[in-house]
């Protein structure tokens, strides 16, 4: 019986977070087909000073909720102007989960996002202005109500509606004159009149 030469070739498994520590390898692992590998890469990258930039770049591409949540949690813990700059473009995303994740992350960085609010409220895209008003509703910043009063002057009814909803929750009596003036600007919009009345009543009860 002839001898069969043994196959000496061995399969080399893909790198894992336990077998790599160089930044390029971790970035490659962050693009793995396996969500578990990507989550492990997030943990490893968060522990590095140079690891946050790759996470900022990845957040826009990630589609698995658990990995996206891990990335966002890491970015929030490393809050910075650079992280905010990476999250702001996601307000234009057509994917609601990604957009909502960005809003959640920005809301956790009030001081870092504050310098961008005025520009966001002037954005040509009315959706961005609406999302900004929604953000202000939950942004723990001393100027949040002031910015919402600014949004009340918007020409788009849905932006005003978002601002009214926000002021109903966090507005004070100083918002009442601006609120009272809104329905007259949208005389055919019954929702604006209704929302304004509710907001005025809530503020009046505070």
Image (tube, helix red, strand yellow):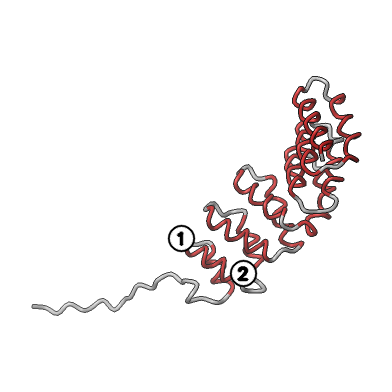
Q: Residue at x 77, y 23 (%)?
A: 189
Question: Which comes sooner in the sequence, label 2 or label 1?
Answer: 1
Residue with the most extreme top position: 188
- Asked where in the image residue 3 lies, by quadrant, the reply is bottom left
Classify 10 Å Cα crowding around label 2: few (below 14), some (14-19), many (20 and above): many
Quarter of the image with the N terminus in it: bottom left
Label 2: which secondary element: helix
Where residue 144 sits in the image (x, y, percent)? 82, 48
Asked whether the beta carbons under mark 2 and mark 1 sit within 8 Å of each other, the answer is no
Report, in whole angstroms, how far the alpha carbon at label 2 lies from the one at label 1.
19 Å
Q: Residue at x 73, y 39 (%)?
A: 127
Towards the viewer: 1 or 83: 83
Where residue 125 sits in the image (x, y, percent)? 76, 39
Q: Is residue 57 left or right of residue 189?
A: left
Q: Which residue is mark 1?
A: 34
Towards the viewer: 131 or 149: 149
Q: Which residue is mark 2?
A: 46
Q: Is residue 24 left or right of residue 154?
A: left
Q: Residue at x 78, y 38 (%)?
A: 168
Q: Is residue 36 left or right of residue 83?
A: left
- Asked where in the image residue 92 lies, by quadrant, the reply is top right
89 above or below 128? below
Q: Is residue 184 left or right of residue 104?
A: right
Towards the viewer: 20 or 74: 74
Where residue 192 sits in the image (x, y, percent)? 78, 27
Q: Residue at x 88, y 35 (%)?
A: 176
Closer to viewer: mark 2 or mark 1 = 2
29 above or below 160? below
Residue with the most extreme front position: 205
Residue with the most extreme left position: 1
């Amino acid at each position: 019986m002839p001898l069969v030469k043994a196959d000496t070739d061995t399969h080399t498994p893909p790198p894992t977070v336990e077998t790599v520590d160089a930044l390029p390898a971790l970035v490659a692992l962050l693009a793995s087909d396996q969500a578990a590998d990507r989550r492990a890469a997030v943990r490893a990258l968060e522990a590095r000073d140079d690891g946050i930039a790759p996470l900022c770049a990845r957040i826009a591409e990630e589609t698995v909720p658990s990995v996206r949540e891990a990335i966002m949690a890491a970015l929030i813990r490393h809050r910075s102007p650079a992280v905010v700059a990476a999250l702001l473009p996601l307000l234009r995303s057509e994917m609601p989960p990604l957009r909502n994740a960005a809003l959640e992350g920005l809301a956790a960085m009030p001081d870092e996002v504050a310098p961008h609010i005025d520009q966001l409220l002037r954005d040509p895209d009315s959706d961005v202005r609406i999302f900004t008003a929604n953000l202000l509703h939950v942004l723990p910043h001393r100027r949040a109500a002031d910015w919402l009063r600014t949004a009340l002057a918007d020409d788009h009814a849905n932006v005003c509606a978002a601002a009214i909803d926000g002021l109903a929750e966090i507005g004070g009596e100083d918002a009442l004159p601006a609120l009272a003036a809104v329905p007259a600007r949208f005389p055919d919009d019954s929702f604006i009149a209704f929302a304004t009345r509710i907001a005025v009543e809530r503020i009046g009860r505070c």
